[in-house]
Amino acid sequence: MNIWHGLLFLLVLVTISEGKLNVLLIVADDLRPSLGCYGYEPLITPNIDLLASQSVVFNRTYAQQAICGPSRASFLTSRRPNTTHVYDQHTYWRKRGGNFTTLPQHFKNNGYVTFSVGKIFHPGAASGKTDDYPYSWSVPPYHPSTQQYKMAKVCPGPDGKLYMNIVCPVDVIAMPEKTLPDLQSTQHALQIMQNVSRFPEQPFFLAVGYHKPHIPLKYPREYLNLYPLDKIHLAPDPLMSNDIRTY
């Protein structure tokens, strides 16, 4: 089994179906290499580290564009933004740059059933308001229902009131629908894999896109317990002189 691990996405070849490998593509939004497998010891990332230990790990990676829409259009069509003509969050490459075949579309055209869960293409106008369905996907893409609450005031402040913080730990059971978007996406992806396992003769391509760690970041409170504040140290400021007086 070959497993490819990259900074932005993970392409996992999971099983063989009639000589064809099933494919699991995992995309994390705004993930940087602050991971154990990249030598960053303060963070606890055992699952990614385990995957990396069995993988080809790339030590260099380059984004073709700095925002979601054009960046995702670029790596999913294998074309640069100056070819797709996508430079913002509102342009659909098929209408502006060309009717380019995407990675999942290539698999679909070659007999795979293809699924999209969460954020793969940038949603909205950047993917034709359909997440590029039906070109790339065999069934309509799935989006977690709780994503609509991403700007909700669920972060408790010192005054006891709830605020819309950019980052905060939360009690999942107290959230709308008692879950979080990425938890929903994981459960839906597992359900898909369970369903397709009943048809071993049919190869599949499953793309799972996580919204986090992109802000606003609400995360299960138990993860905060792994990082006591008295153990967290700020990186030194290279521009700060030791001669500057403090008050």
Image: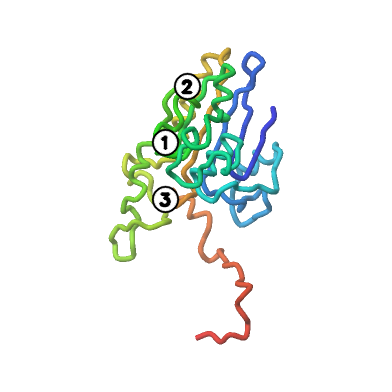
Picture layout, residue 105 above or below residue 77: above
- Cβ–Cβ under 8 Å for marks 3 and 2: no
Q: Nearer the viewer, residue 130 or 113?
A: 130
Q: What distance separates the C-alpha of mark 3 from that of mark 2?
A: 31 Å
Looking at the picture, how far across and down is residue 114, in whole percent? Answer: 51, 24
- Closest to the camera, between mark 1 and mark 2, is 2
Residue type beneath disc 1: Gln
Q: Which of 124 and 214 is in front in this view?
A: 124
- Closest to the camera, between mark 3 and mark 2, is 2
Left or right, 165 with respect to 111, comes to left
Residue type beneath disc 3: Lys
Residue type beneath disc 2: Ser
What SS does tag 2 mark?
A: loop
What SS does tag 3 mark?
A: strand
Residue named by callout 3: 218
**Point 31% across, 43% down: residue:** 176
Residue named by callout 2: 138
Residue named by callout 1: 184
Number of other residues with Cα within 10 Å of mark 1, as a class: few under 14, some 14 to 19, many 20 or more = some
Q: What distance separates the C-alpha of mark 1 from that of mark 2?
A: 20 Å
Q: Earlier in the sequence, mark 3 or mark 2?
A: 2
Looking at the picture, how far across and down is residue 133, in whole percent? Answer: 44, 27
Q: Earlier in the sequence, mark 3 or mark 1?
A: 1
Looking at the picture, how far across and down is residue 107, in whole percent? Answer: 58, 23
